[in-house]
Amino acid sequence: MEYQLTAEVVPPVGTPALDALQRHGVAALLDEHLDLLAEIEGPDGVEIEPVDHRVSVQDGGASITWVLDAPALAFAEDAARQVLGELLERTELLTDWAVRRCEVTASDEDLAAALAGVDVGDDDTAQGDVEIEIDLDELDELTLLGEPSDDDVATKRDHLSEAAEALGAFGPDAFGHDSDDPDNEISEDDAALVAGALIAGLELLTEELFVDIQTLEDAGTPASEHEVLWVLHDLPTRYAGHYTALFAKKFLITTAVLGYRLALPDWDGPLNTAEVLAIRLAEGAARNQLDAAGLTDELPLDAMFETFEEYAFGDLDVTDLFETEAEAGPEAEADDEDDVDELVLVDWFEPFADEDDDDESEEDEFDVADAVDQTVQA
């Protein structure tokens, strides 16, 4: 049975926050070593097979989502913890790092099946191994180790507040703050935290796209042929068959251009459909940043992001972009394959037409789209 585990590995206490290059290096090291694991041998020869993994590195450490095929939940969790510890010891640049958290995440149905596997009375060997390898006290202790400390949460919040300084395109009012309304529940500091999360989320999104590009290039297949991708699986799924490495490169450039535009003092709306999608994905990444800082229950995030979208998108209706195949109806299924391919690989990166634009602004927009194509071709 397959189990999904979540693990966190962290550098020694007092290590400065990792910069972008260090985060990329840590991700590459962990990903490379996890790729080399064809099989894990557990107690008494129990075979555990790695199925898939994802590595996400932030400034304070790395998170690993790992799918293992194992006879029981206890085997999967214990094997993952031991293997990750050995992997860090054998990786010269990560020898001082430690496994802070390692636990199985499973649905109620999966958990029931796993417990059934543990309680098989006819298999004395398996039952004995489980009792030796893990017990409830150890599991509770391990789970508690994964809880962030108050210092960790405070550090994350400080990081978000500092990141907000890079957002020039939107002020506090774009996140629901109203200095003229004494009853307004969203403070300027609250708005800064969400603004910083948006910038931090976009940075992480850009880094993760590098990994998706490498994955698609190595396999030579589109996103629809992969079970796990960092970014592309969050785009509209009905076009996944056309999310190739080329598409991912063009989308990466879009996120880079978006980051530059968000740093400018003015905002005149998204340049194209791809930028709309990038903003939506950045919102999702921002919510993850806010959750890690313990702010999900403290701030009215739904209302704040709704206000932000009003500022970011204006009158542009983006609802249809994120329809599923079922929601899109039979018209989407009847689309000609070549038309869908052209929509994804060409139309999404073309500038929005605006009859009120003067010749100079139209030329500027064309240059942005043309730069995307030229950069990818290069």
Image (spheres, rainbow, N blue to C red):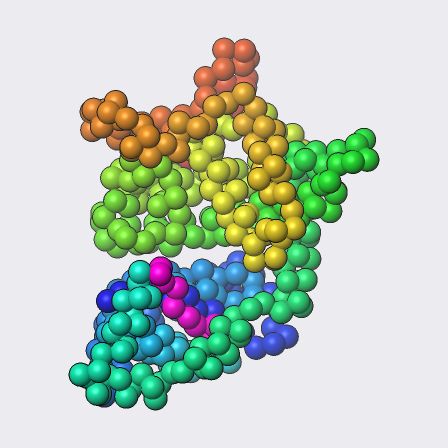
Horizontal side, residue 35 vs residue 365: left or right: left
Return the x and y of residue 318 as percentages of the image width and height: 45, 27
Q: Please say whether residue 104 is one of the residues in the magenta stretch.
A: yes
On the rendered image, what quadrant is the N terminus found in? bottom left
Return the x and y of residue 356 as percentages of the image width and height: 54, 11
On the rendered image, what quadrant is the C terminus found in? top left
Above or below: residue 236 compared with residue 364: below
Return the x and y of residue 303 as percentages of the image width and height: 61, 37
Visible residue check, residue 308: no
Q: Please say whether residue 292 is one of the residues in the magenta stretch.
A: no
Q: Tell which of 265 and 41 is nearer to you.
A: 41
Magenta stretch secondary structure, dominant? strand
Q: Tell which of 190 and 117 is nearer to you.
A: 117
Q: Spot the residue most to the top.
A: 355
Rendered residue at 58%/67% (across/down): 148
Quarter of the rendering containing residue 171:
top right
Q: Tell which of 248 and 359 is nearer to you.
A: 248
Rendered residue at 39%/64% (across/down): 105
Visible residue check, residue 206: yes
Give the magenta range.
Answer: 98-108
Rendered residue at 40%/47% (across/down): 231
Q: Spot the residue most to the left.
A: 122
Above or below: residue 132 compared with residue 314: below
Q: Tell which of 52 and 137 is nearer to you.
A: 137
Return the x and y of residue 145 as percentages of the image width and height: 53, 74
